[in-house]
């Protein structure tokens, strides 16, 4: 990650003693306030069930409108390191 732009990298401190331990995405969704908690230490799903429900409804809707993927061979030109460390359209 030394080559990625600094804005693309989040440096996380050691896990705080009061960090959430109630997040297991295999069992139920987690919810984080990314601007305030970019390292995802504090799961807010139990505190904000209405927001979680709204986001899950949106996800179900968007999933219902998806077109099935047509797997294509990987294009080596898609490597972000060829584009200043960013994912961008390429031709």
Image: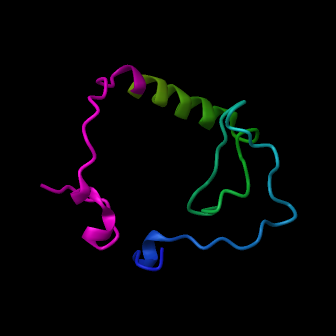
- Toward the viewer: 33 or 26? 26
Stretch in magenta: 63-91
Q: Residue furthest right?
A: 17
Residue at (64% x, 32% y) in the render:
50
- Coloring scheme used: rainbow
Q: Look at the picture and state if 10 lies above or below 43.
A: below
Secondary structure mostly taken by the magenta-highlighted segment of the chain: loop
Classify residue 59 as left or right of residue 37. left
Classify residue 31 as left or right of residue 16. left
Q: Look at the picture and state if 2 lies above or below 29.
A: below
**Residue 82 x %, y %:** 26, 69
Q: Is residue 83 magenta?
A: yes
**In which quadrant is the C terminus drawn?**
bottom left
Q: Is residue 68 magenta?
A: yes
The number of callouts visible is 0
Please tell me in which quadrant of the rendered image residue 36 appears: bottom right
Q: Residue furthest top?
A: 64
Residue at (30% x, 61% y) in the render:
79
**Residue 47 x %, y %:** 75, 42
Residue at (26% x, 29% y) in the render:
70
Please tell me in which quadrant of the rendered image residue 77 appears: bottom left
**Residue 78 x %, y %:** 26, 56
**Residue 89 x %, y %:** 20, 55
- Toward the viewer: 5 or 51? 5
- Toward the viewer: 82 or 68? 82
Q: Look at the picture and state if 33 lies above or below 14.
A: above
């Amino acid at each position: 990650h030394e080559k990625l732009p600094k804005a693309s990298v989040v440096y996380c401190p050691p896990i705080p003693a009061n960090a959430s331990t109630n997040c297991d995405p295999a069992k139920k969704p987690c919810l984080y306030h990314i601007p305030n908690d970019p390292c995802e230490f504090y799961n807010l799903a139990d505190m904000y069930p209405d927001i979680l429900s709204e986001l899950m409804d949106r996800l179900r809707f968007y999933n219902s409108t998806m077109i099935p993927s047509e797997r294509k061979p990987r294009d080596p030109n898609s490597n972000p390191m060829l584009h200043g460390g960013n994912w961008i359209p390429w031709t």
